[in-house]
Amino acid sequence: MTGARDHNDVLEGLKELHALERSAGERLASMIELEPGAQLRELLEWQRVRAEWHEDALRARLAETGEAPSTLKGLGALARSGLEGLQDMARDDLARSGRELYAGHHRLLAAYSLLELAAERVADEPTSRLARRHRDEQEEMAAAVASRWASFAAASRDRTRGEGP
């Protein structure tokens, strides 16, 4: 038997993930501004577009449930993203940014896994399906970052030497 608390967990999970995806998109945009070179730029652009798709899908799912994204959570996520983006730009370190991107995918992966479980508990198949699909895509995006560690390191090394992209 499920109760209001279980349904609330699903709605809060959707709102939190919406804010996290919005923050991820902003962070990716700040990484792209570091001019990482063609190979990394392509990866970051692809992931930024995916984050926007995820944000849109989460907003649509919230609307289907009669809810809206949380303004407070969204503002908090954007503020954190903005500060982190400024820190990245100040240290101009693409390797460190790549590490944070990889860790961010794993935070999202965990959040989507928990949302999927909460949705299954209340028999919310549309949310469960969305969470499963996004979780799988987070795994794919994390693997894409991991396959380019040498590129992140080289881009950082080149910037440190003043060679730039």
Image (cartoon, rainbow, N blue to C red):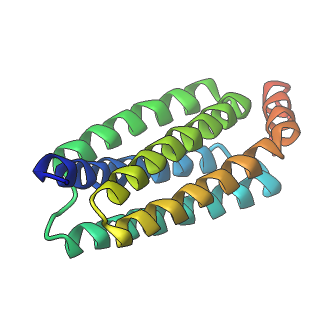
Q: Looking at the picture, tell me which residue is in the foreground, 152 or 37.
A: 152
Residue extending furthest front?
1
Q: Horizontal and vertical percent for residue 133?
A: 54, 65
| Residue 22 seen in the current view | no
Residue found at x 44% / y 67%: 130
Left-right relation of 105 to 7: right
To which quarter of the image does residue 100 belong? top right
Left-right relation of 124 to 160: left
Q: Horizontal and vertical percent for residue 43?
A: 72, 57
Residue found at x 80% / y 57%: 38
| Residue 5 seen in the current view | yes
Residue found at x 22% / y 58%: 69
Left-right relation of 16 to 45: left
Q: Image height check: is 4 above or below 97?
A: below
Left-right relation of 125 to 9: right
Residue found at x 21% / y 49%: 6
